Amino acid sequence: MKFEQIGFLDKVFVRRPYFEASAYRVDRLGEVLKLQAFRNAVWLASPEFYRELEKKGFEFDLLNSRERLTALKFYNRMSFRATPFGAFSAFGLGGWALEGEGGKVEGIDPVLHLLPSVQYELDGLEARPLTGDVLLALNPTLYRFAAGWRYSRYETDAKGKLSFFVYLLAYDEVDELLLGRLADKPSPLARLVDYLRELTDCTDEEAGAHIVRLVDEQVLITEQALSLLRDGVFEGQVSVNYNEGLSLPDLVAGGVRDGKSFYAGLELQASVDLPLHWQQEVLEALQVLDVLAPVPPENNLDRFREAFEQKFGERRVPLLEALDPDLGVPFDEGELSDEHELLKGLEFGQVQQKNDQLTWTPVHRLLVKAWLQNGRRDQYEPVVLTAGDVSGLPGNELPFPPSTSVFCSIAGDKLIFQNIGGATANALTGRFSAFSGDFEGFCRSVAALEEGANPEVLFAEVLQVSHRKVDNINRRRRVYGRVIPLNSFPPEGSILPKDVDVLVRGGEVLLVQRLSGKRVIPRLPTAFNYHHNEMVLFRFLCALQYKSVRANFDFDPEKYFPGLNFYPRMAYGRTVLSLAKWYLDKAETAALTRRPLSISRLHLFCRERGIPARVSMGRGDQQLVFDLSDDEEALFFLESLKEQVEPVIREYIGKAEGRRFNDQYVLSLMNPAAVYAPVQPGAEAVPVVRDFAPGSEWVYLKVYATYQSLEQILLGTLLPWISSNRQRIRQWFFVRYYDTGPHLRVRFRLDAGIVKDFQYGLQSLLAGGEVSAVVQQAYFDTYQREIERYSAGLIEAVEEVFCRGSEFVAERLALMATREEARDSLWPLVHCYRIITVFFDGDWEQVIPLCRWCADAFFREHGGGKKLKRAMDDRFRELRAGLAEAVSGDGIAGMVSPALELALRRLSEAAMESGFNRQQLMADIVHMQVNRFFTSEQRRHEALIWHCLLKMAVTGSKRQAQSEAAVMDGR
């Protein structure tokens, strides 16, 4: 079971607003304005607003209505919003306690940590001179491309956001030597100047100017460049005991700095413990959420995987080349270097794709029954799910992450889920390591547990500068042993992008460090939304975190039934899975905010819509909490409602009984099992030619047409021509493909002397007669051997199997085109059965696991539902008699030609000698043969074929056992 081994870390991350929620009252704002803690928080968050208040002596009566409303929002946030931000709220580490022992808070002053903000630090770094002892390194994204190098560089807009572009550095012999000198390690500027002077006989000034130009163009990066990562305390960090007597403006008096030049964190020194019994209830709720939470739809990484497989198969491709817009395949939209000036500075949202199709799932049926068709509950009452409701519903097959977080709060006897998931528990806690050694140790312990449970892979945190202001939340102390630097100077222990390959295995996109051969798992141990960064490489690495694991357990009924204006609370046991929420349309908002504001109108509206007195409104850091039964707060609500573009009101379930503060908790869960499979090593590499350009011994032809026309071209034109020229062809094979359109890919191996004449013959064949009318496009291309997929030592034996397999299929297809056969629909199945048993020499202990592995994989790929399994079982029963007759008679031997049988046996022996994975090899061979059998829907055919092959293999094994038993009995 997925959750049996899941455990909780001893430490609990606590988030707390600075003010007590129990003391909050709107009419106390004048009193709050006098508090130094409030003034400090405003000074850090908004120096401009602080100066407005300061001019008026922080006197409530002197503030205008706009200023009062803004100040009231700050006060509200400081009382209810627990998200750590400056001095508005605090964070700390608590623990677990038995019932009645937890929750005791000692009156110890918190500690305020002040770090220089990213913008302030950048301003200082940019003013530093580039001296001779400064180390320089290559831009980690630099790679060779055609006549030069490509790399990612950025420009910074007025708001501080970095926009990324792919740039080309034209080839220069001097640059090649200079960059080569930096390929292995950084070097001081002075040493590079000396090198250029000796190399080109230039002056020191000329050499220095050339290097500075490369730095300005971001080809080179200096160690003075901003790094968001530190080993230990950040330079310039100040930590002070925080109490009402401390004035931050006075603390920095005499300087030119204001609140925006600091990145602040307020750390609790008090112990806050949670009752231990919540652990079991959280685990039980997680098992329910594993069923209820939707699986993310196909995303950019899925599309990348499909495109990568189509272009590269199972080849290992250098990471930077795999994402190159010309050499590789697209991921996301990519960095554009030709953006027109007209669009500079504009930020466009994602184009909304209209999709009217609704996929109906068992969860939809459950919600209809428990919520929409449940006549026993009032419309606005919570929907309480039970274990019986979810029993029998299919769970998610993805494994639990190595670690993840449960973000929650407690109110009375209820635990309220705010957010659940993440690829690592460090995603929510990592940024706090910048402030505190305690949090650094906590995050390092999470990283150590992840690495200990997955020793065969390398965890590496991504180091990237994205925004001069937002990047404050990306600052952290280093918690993982390895780092993938992108636009930052490479620290010790870096895994450079140029040293990483991409490959696809078992439907997964994998990263592999070339030197060690180990799989690399990227980590971004902060809460930064990586979609806000335009750099393709960064987004790709961050997206990889979430694949292969169940990274999101959030449940929202709106995901299943979008477009409603009300969603009730969903609960399971004592846990709240999602809060009730109400959407207001423009007409409702206009009526409620019409002047003069009316509290009675608001109360009437709330009764009609079932809205409770205690609510929250707003998103993210703009969320406010209201008690609508209080007239002052009701007016505050109406004033705030006017500013909402798409108002969403949520029920608010307050603080736990007996506690003064509106605390929130982040629980860290650990999975001690190995989650990530290591990359299986291939056979030992031997020298072999990979690429064969047009004109070389391998002629590679692509022919595009419709599915029907391609079959006519193959059977009526290409195969007869190949047959008449067979003596000139050393090897040949074909596959069907879809890449921008359906097409045939045909490869011929020839003697060098006839290549030109052979290519001309193919061109003439396709350009003449009726075939020219249906050929949409035909051209010769470079044949790139899939050496990473099959190994250098086996590639030629694999090509021989492909050749003999193509010959056999071509003969069968030609035969079927001329006359009908009784078992035409069965021969692909029988053929696959035969090649598997030949390859493994009838060893059922090899055959059955292969068939089960492939059958399960294809079944999951196509939905994995009971309906599909039942349909495939029924189909097999229809075919069983014919298949049994086919495999038991003498005709089974004819289902593999002698030449193909010999090629299969030789390949099997070579694979065993080299230690190559024969199961994967045979799965690939069957895949290629199925591809050749059918004009379209090959993967669906393959799913059924493997389903039937598994049943046939089990039957064959039983018959062999019975036969052997009979022989023994006869003795």
Image (cartoon, rainbow, N blue to C red):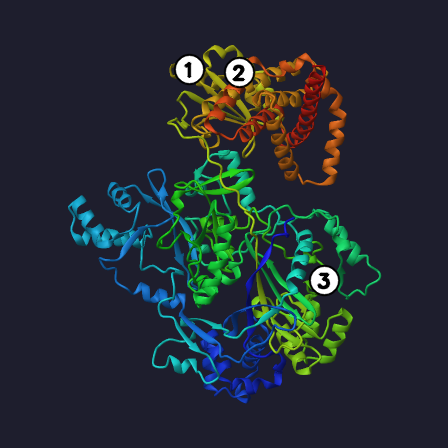
Q: Is residue 677 above or below residue 525?
A: above
Q: Earlier in the sequence, mark 3 or mark 2?
A: 3
Q: Earlier in the sequence, mark 1 or mark 3?
A: 3
Q: Foreground mark, 1 or 2?
A: 2
Q: Which residue is mark 3?
A: 571
Q: Which residue is mark 2?
A: 902
How much space separates mark 1 and mark 3, taking CA atoms?
A: 75 Å
Residue type at mark 3: give it.
Ala
Q: Residues within 10 Å of mark 2 (few under 14, many from 20)?
A: some
Where residue 301 appears, x then y in whole percent? 54, 45
> SS at mark 1?
helix
Residue type at mark 1: give it.
Asp
How much space separates mark 1 and mark 2, taking CA atoms?
A: 32 Å
Residue type at mark 2: give it.
Leu
Q: Foreground mark, 3 or 2?
A: 2
Q: Is residue 66 above or below residue 856?
A: below
Please indicate whether residue 356 sits to the left or right of residue 17 in the image: right
Q: Earlier in the sequence, mark 1 or mark 2?
A: 1
> SS at mark 3?
strand
Q: Quadrant of the C terminus?
A: top right
Q: Is residue 49 above or below residue 2?
A: below
Residue 757 numbered mark, or none? 1
> SS at mark 2?
helix
Residue 893 visible to the viewer: yes
Q: Is residue 619 above or below residue 626?
A: above
Where residue 877 appears, x then y in whole percent? 76, 27
Residue 16 numbered mark, or none? none
How much space separates mark 3 and mark 2, taking CA atoms?
A: 64 Å
Residue in front for this viewpoint, 889 or 723: 889
Q: Residues within 10 Å of mark 3 (few under 14, many from 20)?
A: many
Residue 767 visible to the viewer: no
Where residue 155 appears, x then y in whole percent? 39, 56
